Image (cartoon, grey):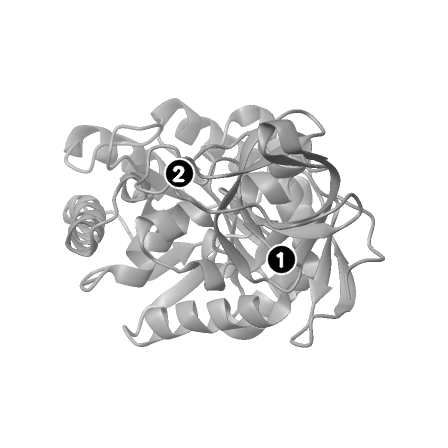
Protein backbone atom coordinates (compact mmCIF):
# COMPACT_ATOMS: atom_id res chain seq x y z
CA UNK A 1 0.00 0.00 0.00
CA UNK A 2 1.18 3.51 -0.80
CA UNK A 3 -1.39 5.59 1.06
CA UNK A 4 0.90 6.33 3.99
CA UNK A 5 3.53 8.00 1.80
CA UNK A 6 3.72 11.81 1.75
CA UNK A 7 2.82 13.22 -1.63
CA UNK A 8 4.11 14.08 -4.09
CA UNK A 9 6.88 11.48 -4.08
CA UNK A 10 8.79 9.33 -6.54
CA UNK A 11 7.85 5.67 -7.03
CA UNK A 12 10.20 3.14 -8.64
CA UNK A 13 8.80 -0.24 -9.67
CA UNK A 14 11.69 -2.60 -8.93
CA UNK A 15 10.35 -5.50 -10.99
CA UNK A 16 9.78 -3.38 -14.08
CA UNK A 17 13.23 -1.81 -13.78
CA UNK A 18 14.83 -5.27 -13.49
CA UNK A 19 13.05 -6.35 -16.67
CA UNK A 20 14.30 -3.23 -18.46
CA UNK A 21 17.88 -3.91 -17.36
CA UNK A 22 17.63 -7.44 -18.70
CA UNK A 23 16.14 -6.17 -21.96
CA UNK A 24 19.16 -3.98 -22.63
CA UNK A 25 21.58 -6.68 -21.52
CA UNK A 26 20.09 -9.03 -24.08
CA UNK A 27 20.17 -6.35 -26.80
CA UNK A 28 23.87 -5.70 -26.25
CA UNK A 29 25.11 -9.18 -25.51
CA UNK A 30 23.22 -10.82 -28.38
CA UNK A 31 25.31 -8.57 -30.61
CA UNK A 32 28.50 -9.55 -28.72
CA UNK A 33 29.21 -5.93 -27.84
CA UNK A 34 30.06 -4.26 -24.53
CA UNK A 35 27.45 -2.09 -22.85
CA UNK A 36 28.01 1.05 -20.77
CA UNK A 37 24.97 2.25 -18.77
CA UNK A 38 24.51 6.00 -18.46
CA UNK A 39 23.69 6.81 -14.83
CA UNK A 40 22.67 10.45 -15.26
CA UNK A 41 19.00 9.48 -14.96
CA UNK A 42 19.28 7.25 -11.89
CA UNK A 43 21.81 9.16 -9.76
CA UNK A 44 21.56 6.38 -7.19
CA UNK A 45 24.16 4.07 -5.65
CA UNK A 46 21.63 1.26 -5.43
CA UNK A 47 20.77 1.48 -9.12
CA UNK A 48 24.48 1.77 -9.96
CA UNK A 49 25.21 -1.43 -8.02
CA UNK A 50 22.49 -3.26 -9.98
CA UNK A 51 24.01 -2.01 -13.23
CA UNK A 52 27.44 -3.23 -12.14
CA UNK A 53 25.97 -6.68 -11.52
CA UNK A 54 24.33 -6.71 -14.96
CA UNK A 55 26.93 -5.04 -17.16
CA UNK A 56 30.28 -4.96 -15.37
CA UNK A 57 32.52 -2.09 -14.33
CA UNK A 58 31.73 0.44 -17.08
CA UNK A 59 29.51 3.46 -16.57
CA UNK A 60 28.82 6.79 -18.20
CA UNK A 61 28.10 9.96 -16.23
CA UNK A 62 27.18 13.52 -17.07
CA UNK A 63 28.54 15.20 -13.92
CA UNK A 64 31.69 14.83 -11.83
CA UNK A 65 29.38 14.61 -8.83
CA UNK A 66 28.18 11.28 -10.23
CA UNK A 67 31.73 9.93 -10.32
CA UNK A 68 32.29 10.99 -6.74
CA UNK A 69 29.00 9.55 -5.49
CA UNK A 70 29.17 6.25 -7.40
CA UNK A 71 32.68 5.12 -6.56
CA UNK A 72 32.67 1.89 -4.60
CA UNK A 73 29.51 0.53 -6.26
CA UNK A 74 31.39 -1.95 -8.43
CA UNK A 75 32.08 0.63 -11.14
CA UNK A 76 35.66 1.51 -11.96
CA UNK A 77 35.65 2.74 -15.58
CA UNK A 78 33.78 6.04 -15.89
CA UNK A 79 33.22 7.96 -19.13
CA UNK A 80 32.38 11.61 -18.50
CA UNK A 81 30.05 12.58 -21.32
CA UNK A 82 30.12 16.38 -21.19
CA UNK A 83 33.01 18.03 -23.02
CA UNK A 84 35.68 18.75 -20.43
CA UNK A 85 37.15 22.20 -19.76
CA UNK A 86 40.44 22.99 -17.98
CA UNK A 87 38.72 24.49 -14.93
CA UNK A 88 37.54 20.97 -14.03
CA UNK A 89 40.94 19.27 -14.28
CA UNK A 90 41.89 19.69 -10.61
CA UNK A 91 38.63 18.26 -9.33
CA UNK A 92 38.85 15.43 -11.83
CA UNK A 93 42.35 14.56 -10.66
CA UNK A 94 41.11 14.34 -7.07
CA UNK A 95 38.62 11.65 -8.10
CA UNK A 96 41.20 9.33 -9.63
CA UNK A 97 42.14 6.22 -7.67
CA UNK A 98 43.14 2.61 -8.21
CA UNK A 99 39.44 1.72 -8.37
CA UNK A 100 38.32 4.82 -10.26
CA UNK A 101 39.50 5.70 -13.76
CA UNK A 102 37.82 8.51 -15.67
CA UNK A 103 37.88 9.08 -19.41
CA UNK A 104 36.83 12.53 -20.58
CA UNK A 105 35.32 13.75 -23.83
CA UNK A 106 36.51 16.76 -25.82
CA UNK A 107 36.23 18.33 -29.26
CA UNK A 108 38.79 21.15 -29.07
CA UNK A 109 42.52 21.02 -29.74
CA UNK A 110 43.32 23.73 -27.17
CA UNK A 111 41.58 21.70 -24.46
CA UNK A 112 43.50 18.63 -25.63
CA UNK A 113 46.79 20.55 -25.30
CA UNK A 114 45.79 21.74 -21.83
CA UNK A 115 44.85 18.20 -20.76
CA UNK A 116 48.17 16.77 -21.93
CA UNK A 117 50.07 19.52 -20.11
CA UNK A 118 48.07 19.00 -16.91
CA UNK A 119 48.67 15.25 -16.93
CA UNK A 120 52.38 15.68 -17.54
CA UNK A 121 52.77 18.23 -14.74
CA UNK A 122 50.86 16.10 -12.24
CA UNK A 123 52.20 12.77 -13.53
CA UNK A 124 48.74 11.28 -13.96
CA UNK A 125 46.76 9.83 -16.84
CA UNK A 126 43.33 11.13 -17.88
CA UNK A 127 42.51 9.51 -21.22
CA UNK A 128 40.10 11.16 -23.62
CA UNK A 129 37.70 10.34 -26.42
CA UNK A 130 36.93 12.72 -29.23
CA UNK A 131 33.23 13.51 -29.29
CA UNK A 132 31.64 13.05 -32.72
CA UNK A 133 28.74 15.28 -33.79
CA UNK A 134 26.22 13.28 -35.77
CA UNK A 135 23.31 15.67 -36.09
CA UNK A 136 24.51 19.22 -35.53
CA UNK A 137 22.64 19.58 -32.26
CA UNK A 138 25.49 20.41 -29.87
CA UNK A 139 29.21 19.73 -29.27
CA UNK A 140 31.45 17.41 -31.26
CA UNK A 141 33.59 17.04 -34.37
CA UNK A 142 31.97 16.10 -37.68
CA UNK A 143 32.74 12.46 -38.55
CA UNK A 144 34.13 13.47 -41.95
CA UNK A 145 36.26 16.35 -40.62
CA UNK A 146 39.57 14.52 -40.95
CA UNK A 147 41.66 17.64 -40.40
CA UNK A 148 40.13 18.47 -37.04
CA UNK A 149 39.98 14.86 -35.92
CA UNK A 150 43.65 14.31 -36.65
CA UNK A 151 44.69 17.63 -35.13
CA UNK A 152 43.11 16.65 -31.80
CA UNK A 153 44.15 13.02 -32.17
CA UNK A 154 47.81 13.93 -32.70
CA UNK A 155 47.94 15.93 -29.48
CA UNK A 156 46.30 13.26 -27.36
CA UNK A 157 48.09 10.32 -28.96
CA UNK A 158 51.50 11.93 -28.44
CA UNK A 159 50.93 11.64 -24.69
CA UNK A 160 49.20 8.27 -24.78
CA UNK A 161 45.86 9.81 -23.82
CA UNK A 162 43.78 9.07 -26.93
CA UNK A 163 41.30 6.33 -26.05
CA UNK A 164 38.92 6.62 -28.98
CA UNK A 165 35.72 8.27 -30.19
CA UNK A 166 32.14 8.53 -28.93
CA UNK A 167 28.85 9.75 -30.35
CA UNK A 168 25.21 10.11 -29.38
CA UNK A 169 22.32 9.81 -31.84
CA UNK A 170 20.19 12.57 -30.34
CA UNK A 171 18.14 12.74 -33.53
CA UNK A 172 16.67 9.33 -32.69
CA UNK A 173 14.32 10.97 -30.17
CA UNK A 174 12.62 12.81 -33.02
CA UNK A 175 11.65 9.57 -34.79
CA UNK A 176 9.02 6.91 -34.26
CA UNK A 177 8.99 4.59 -37.28
CA UNK A 178 11.08 1.47 -36.73
CA UNK A 179 12.75 1.62 -40.15
CA UNK A 180 13.73 5.26 -39.53
CA UNK A 181 15.15 4.37 -36.12
CA UNK A 182 17.13 1.50 -37.58
CA UNK A 183 18.48 3.83 -40.27
CA UNK A 184 19.45 6.33 -37.58
CA UNK A 185 21.26 3.58 -35.68
CA UNK A 186 23.10 2.53 -38.83
CA UNK A 187 24.21 6.09 -39.54
CA UNK A 188 25.30 6.50 -35.92
CA UNK A 189 27.46 3.38 -36.12
CA UNK A 190 28.88 4.01 -39.59
CA UNK A 191 29.70 7.66 -38.91
CA UNK A 192 31.48 6.93 -35.65
CA UNK A 193 33.42 4.05 -37.19
CA UNK A 194 34.42 6.40 -40.04
CA UNK A 195 35.93 8.81 -37.50
CA UNK A 196 37.79 5.96 -35.80
CA UNK A 197 39.11 4.73 -39.16
CA UNK A 198 40.38 8.20 -39.99
CA UNK A 199 42.36 8.34 -36.75
CA UNK A 200 43.80 4.85 -37.20
CA UNK A 201 44.86 5.56 -40.78
CA UNK A 202 46.75 8.58 -39.48
CA UNK A 203 48.59 6.25 -37.10
CA UNK A 204 46.73 7.08 -33.91
CA UNK A 205 45.31 4.57 -31.46
CA UNK A 206 41.54 4.24 -31.22
CA UNK A 207 40.60 1.44 -28.84
CA UNK A 208 37.13 2.69 -27.90
CA UNK A 209 34.38 3.25 -30.49
CA UNK A 210 31.37 4.12 -28.38
CA UNK A 211 27.87 4.94 -29.60
CA UNK A 212 24.52 5.15 -28.00
CA UNK A 213 21.03 6.29 -27.26
CA UNK A 214 18.22 4.19 -25.85
CA UNK A 215 16.36 3.93 -29.20
CA UNK A 216 19.40 3.06 -31.32
CA UNK A 217 20.87 0.68 -28.73
CA UNK A 218 17.64 -1.30 -28.66
CA UNK A 219 16.66 -1.16 -32.33
CA UNK A 220 19.94 -0.98 -34.24
CA UNK A 221 20.82 -4.03 -36.32
CA UNK A 222 24.43 -3.56 -37.40
CA UNK A 223 27.34 -2.38 -35.25
CA UNK A 224 30.36 -3.50 -37.28
CA UNK A 225 33.44 -1.73 -35.91
CA UNK A 226 31.68 -0.44 -32.78
CA UNK A 227 33.14 -1.62 -29.46
CA UNK A 228 30.44 -0.49 -27.03
CA UNK A 229 26.84 0.67 -26.78
CA UNK A 230 25.58 3.23 -24.27
CA UNK A 231 22.11 4.16 -23.02
CA UNK A 232 20.56 5.55 -19.86
CA UNK A 233 16.85 6.21 -19.71
CA UNK A 234 16.04 2.61 -20.74
CA UNK A 235 16.23 1.46 -17.11
CA UNK A 236 13.16 3.55 -16.26
CA UNK A 237 11.75 4.43 -19.70
CA UNK A 238 9.21 7.27 -19.99
CA UNK A 239 6.43 8.63 -22.18
CA UNK A 240 8.82 10.14 -24.73
CA UNK A 241 10.46 6.74 -25.24
CA UNK A 242 7.00 5.21 -25.61
CA UNK A 243 6.26 7.82 -28.27
CA UNK A 244 9.50 6.98 -30.04
CA UNK A 245 8.36 3.37 -30.05
CA UNK A 246 10.98 1.58 -27.97
CA UNK A 247 8.73 0.71 -25.02
CA UNK A 248 5.10 0.53 -24.01
CA UNK A 249 3.49 2.31 -21.07
CA UNK A 250 3.63 -0.83 -18.92
CA UNK A 251 7.44 -0.80 -19.17
CA UNK A 252 7.74 2.63 -17.52
CA UNK A 253 9.19 1.93 -14.08
CA UNK A 254 9.04 5.48 -12.73
CA UNK A 255 5.99 7.42 -11.55
CA UNK A 256 5.01 10.22 -9.20
CA UNK A 257 2.55 9.42 -6.44
CA UNK A 258 0.15 12.31 -5.92
CA UNK A 259 -2.96 13.15 -3.91
CA UNK A 260 -6.18 14.61 -5.22
CA UNK A 261 -6.68 17.90 -3.40
CA UNK A 262 -9.80 19.15 -5.17
CA UNK A 263 -12.47 18.06 -7.64
CA UNK A 264 -13.41 21.06 -9.72
CA UNK A 265 -16.73 20.02 -11.21
CA UNK A 266 -17.26 23.34 -12.99
CA UNK A 267 -14.14 22.84 -15.12
CA UNK A 268 -14.27 19.02 -15.20
CA UNK A 269 -10.88 18.72 -13.57
CA UNK A 270 -9.17 16.93 -10.72
CA UNK A 271 -6.57 19.04 -8.96
CA UNK A 272 -3.53 17.21 -7.55
CA UNK A 273 -0.57 18.20 -5.39
CA UNK A 274 1.98 17.35 -8.11
CA UNK A 275 2.72 20.39 -10.25
CA UNK A 276 5.79 21.07 -12.32
CA UNK A 277 7.96 21.12 -9.21
CA UNK A 278 7.21 17.40 -8.86
CA UNK A 279 6.79 16.44 -12.53
CA UNK A 280 9.15 18.97 -14.21
CA UNK A 281 8.21 21.36 -17.01
CA UNK A 282 9.27 18.87 -19.68
CA UNK A 283 6.69 18.64 -22.46
CA UNK A 284 8.61 16.20 -24.61
CA UNK A 285 5.51 14.41 -25.91
CA UNK A 286 3.97 17.63 -27.28
CA UNK A 287 5.54 17.02 -30.69
CA UNK A 288 4.73 13.32 -30.80
CA UNK A 289 1.66 11.54 -32.12
CA UNK A 290 0.23 11.24 -28.60
CA UNK A 291 0.55 14.28 -26.35
CA UNK A 292 0.41 13.30 -22.68
CA UNK A 293 0.45 16.85 -21.37
CA UNK A 294 2.54 16.72 -18.20
CA UNK A 295 1.98 13.01 -17.61
CA UNK A 296 -0.24 9.95 -17.99
CA UNK A 297 -2.56 9.29 -15.05
CA UNK A 298 -2.71 5.83 -13.43
CA UNK A 299 -4.39 4.31 -10.40
CA UNK A 300 -2.13 3.52 -7.46
CA UNK A 301 -1.78 -0.09 -8.60
CA UNK A 302 -0.41 1.11 -11.93
CA UNK A 303 -3.59 0.67 -13.97
CA UNK A 304 -3.45 3.18 -16.81
CA UNK A 305 -6.47 5.47 -17.18
CA UNK A 306 -6.71 5.87 -20.93
CA UNK A 307 -6.96 9.47 -22.14
CA UNK A 308 -6.72 10.88 -18.61
CA UNK A 309 -3.69 13.17 -18.43
CA UNK A 310 -2.16 16.00 -16.43
CA UNK A 311 -3.32 18.66 -18.87
CA UNK A 312 -1.84 21.66 -17.05
CA UNK A 313 0.78 22.19 -14.37
CA UNK A 314 1.46 25.06 -12.03
CA UNK A 315 4.23 25.13 -9.46
CA UNK A 316 2.52 22.91 -6.86
CA UNK A 317 -0.74 22.11 -8.63
CA UNK A 318 -1.45 19.65 -11.41
CA UNK A 319 -4.71 19.79 -13.32
CA UNK A 320 -6.03 16.45 -14.57
CA UNK A 321 -8.50 16.37 -17.42
CA UNK A 322 -9.79 13.94 -20.00
CA UNK A 323 -8.03 14.38 -23.32
CA UNK A 324 -10.13 16.63 -25.54
CA UNK A 325 -12.34 14.73 -27.95
CA UNK A 326 -11.62 11.36 -26.33
CA UNK A 327 -14.96 10.90 -24.59
CA UNK A 328 -13.13 9.62 -21.52
CA UNK A 329 -14.50 10.40 -18.08
CA UNK A 330 -12.59 11.42 -15.01
CA UNK A 331 -12.43 8.79 -12.25
CA UNK A 332 -14.74 9.39 -9.32
CA UNK A 333 -12.21 10.52 -6.74
CA UNK A 334 -12.28 12.70 -3.66
CA UNK A 335 -9.66 14.83 -1.90
CA UNK A 336 -7.16 12.51 -0.25
CA UNK A 337 -7.42 9.79 -2.89
CA UNK A 338 -4.14 8.99 -4.63
CA UNK A 339 -2.99 8.52 -8.21
CA UNK A 340 0.30 7.80 -9.98
CA UNK A 341 1.60 9.88 -12.90
CA UNK A 342 3.91 8.49 -15.57
CA UNK A 343 6.49 11.13 -16.61
CA UNK A 344 7.30 12.57 -19.99
CA UNK A 345 11.03 12.58 -19.27
CA UNK A 346 12.33 10.30 -16.53
CA UNK A 347 15.57 12.26 -16.09
CA UNK A 348 13.81 15.57 -15.51
CA UNK A 349 11.12 14.15 -13.22
CA UNK A 350 13.55 12.13 -11.11
CA UNK A 351 15.68 15.24 -10.67
CA UNK A 352 12.85 16.89 -8.72
CA UNK A 353 13.08 14.31 -5.91
CA UNK A 354 15.62 13.23 -3.30
CA UNK A 355 14.70 9.53 -3.09
CA UNK A 356 12.99 6.60 -4.72
CA UNK A 357 10.24 4.74 -2.89
CA UNK A 358 10.93 1.29 -4.29
CA UNK A 359 7.83 -0.84 -4.86
CA UNK A 360 8.08 -4.63 -5.13
CA UNK A 361 6.02 -7.08 -7.17
CA UNK A 362 3.33 -7.12 -4.48
CA UNK A 363 2.92 -3.34 -4.73
CA UNK A 364 4.49 -2.79 -1.33
CA UNK A 365 7.20 -0.25 -0.57
CA UNK A 366 10.24 -2.45 0.01
CA UNK A 367 12.96 0.22 0.31
CA UNK A 368 13.92 3.86 0.03
CA UNK A 369 16.89 4.60 -2.21
CA UNK A 370 18.46 8.06 -1.89
CA UNK A 371 19.09 10.16 -4.98
CA UNK A 372 21.78 12.80 -5.25
CA UNK A 373 22.00 15.89 -7.39
CA UNK A 374 24.41 18.67 -8.19
CA UNK A 375 27.43 18.89 -10.48
Q: Residue at x 33, y 46 (%)?
A: 166
Q: Residue at x 69, y 47 (%)?
A: 68
Measuring from the top left, give residue 3's x and y in whole percent.
80, 58
Measuring from the top left, give residue 314's x and y in whole percent.
64, 25
130 vs 231, left or right, is left
Asked whether residue 204 is in view, the answer is yes
350 vs 252, left or right, is right
* Label 2 SS: loop
Which of pointers 1 and 2 lies earlier in the amino acid sequence? 2
Q: Residue at x 39, y 43 (%)?
A: 326
Q: Provide the residue designation for mark 2.
A: 291
Measuring from the top left, give residue 212's x and y in whole percent.
34, 52
How many marks overall?
2
Q: Nearer the viewer, residue 362 or 41?
A: 362
Q: Which quadrant of the figure contains the C terminus? A: top right
Image-quadrant location for residue 64: top right
The disc label shown at residue 299, or none: 1
Image-quadrant location for residue 106: top left
The CA distance from mark 1 to mark 2 is 19 Å
Image-quadrant location for residue 143: top left
Q: Nearer the viewer, residue 131 or 164?
A: 131
User: Hey, which residue is sitting farthest front in the picture?
Assistant: 266
Q: Nearer the viewer, residue 51 or 301?
A: 301
* Label 1 SS: loop
Q: Which quadrant of the figure contains the N terminus? A: bottom right
The disc label shown at residue 56, or none: none
Front label number (1 vs 2): 1
202 vs 209, left or right, is left
Amino acid sequence: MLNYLPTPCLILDETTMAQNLELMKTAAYDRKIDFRPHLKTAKSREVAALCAQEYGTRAMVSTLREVDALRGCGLTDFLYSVAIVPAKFDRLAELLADDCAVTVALDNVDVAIALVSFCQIHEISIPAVIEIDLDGHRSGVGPADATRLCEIGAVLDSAGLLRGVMSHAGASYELSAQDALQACARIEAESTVLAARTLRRAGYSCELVSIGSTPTALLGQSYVGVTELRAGVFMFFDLVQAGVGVCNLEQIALSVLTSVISHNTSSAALIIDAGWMAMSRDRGTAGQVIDYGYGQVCLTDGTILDDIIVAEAQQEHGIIRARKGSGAKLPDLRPGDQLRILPNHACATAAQHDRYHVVNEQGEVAAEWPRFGGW
